Image (spheres, rainbow, N blue to C red):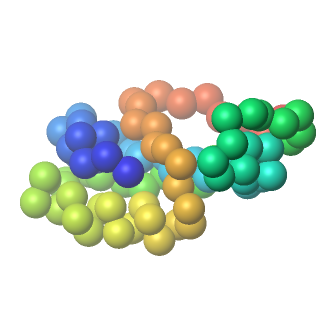
Amino acid sequence: MRRKALDEAIEAQVPIVPITVEGARELMPPGSLRIRPGRLKLTILDPVETTGMTTKDRQELMETVRGTGIVIGCVARTEMDLRPV
């Protein structure tokens, strides 16, 4: 996870939404350049609030987000419309 993304979320005082992925290793094994057909499971986790945080809280925020599981990315937005498929 990149510190800049966390800093931007803290600066904007918006929540971070962790996203995990399952099944990628089977579709693209380590060292392979070939992507195999198949399915991935993306899970959008509960938002982690940044309200009231400063960049001094970045390490704590990073540990909180990492504690949610193996996170492939984070989305920081002021508005979000998430619907299960």
Q: Position of residue 17 (x, y in %)?
A: 49, 46
Q: Position of residue 81 (x, y in %)?
A: 61, 29
Q: Where is residue 30 in the image (x, y as percent from the top left)?
A: 65, 52
Q: Give me the residue at 39% from left, 67% from top.
A: 64
Q: Give me the residue at 39% from left, 30% from top.
A: 78
Question: Please, is residue 31 above or below residue 78 in the view?
Answer: below
Q: Give me the residue at 10% from left, 60% from top.
A: 56
Q: 58 or 23: nearer the eye?
A: 23
Question: Please, is residue 52 above or below residue 73 in the view?
Answer: below
Q: In this view, does 75 lie to the left or right of 46?
A: left
Q: In this view, does 76 lie to the left or right of 29?
A: left
Q: 37 or 85: nearer the eye?
A: 37
Q: Can residue 39 be seen in this view?
A: yes
Q: Where is residue 73 in the image (x, y as percent from the top left)?
A: 49, 44
Q: Give me the residue at 42% from left, 61% from top.
A: 65
Say which quadrant the C terminus sits in.
top right
Q: Is residue 60 left or right of residue 83?
A: left
Question: Please, is residue 54 above or below residue 77 in the view?
Answer: below
Q: How many marks?
A: 0
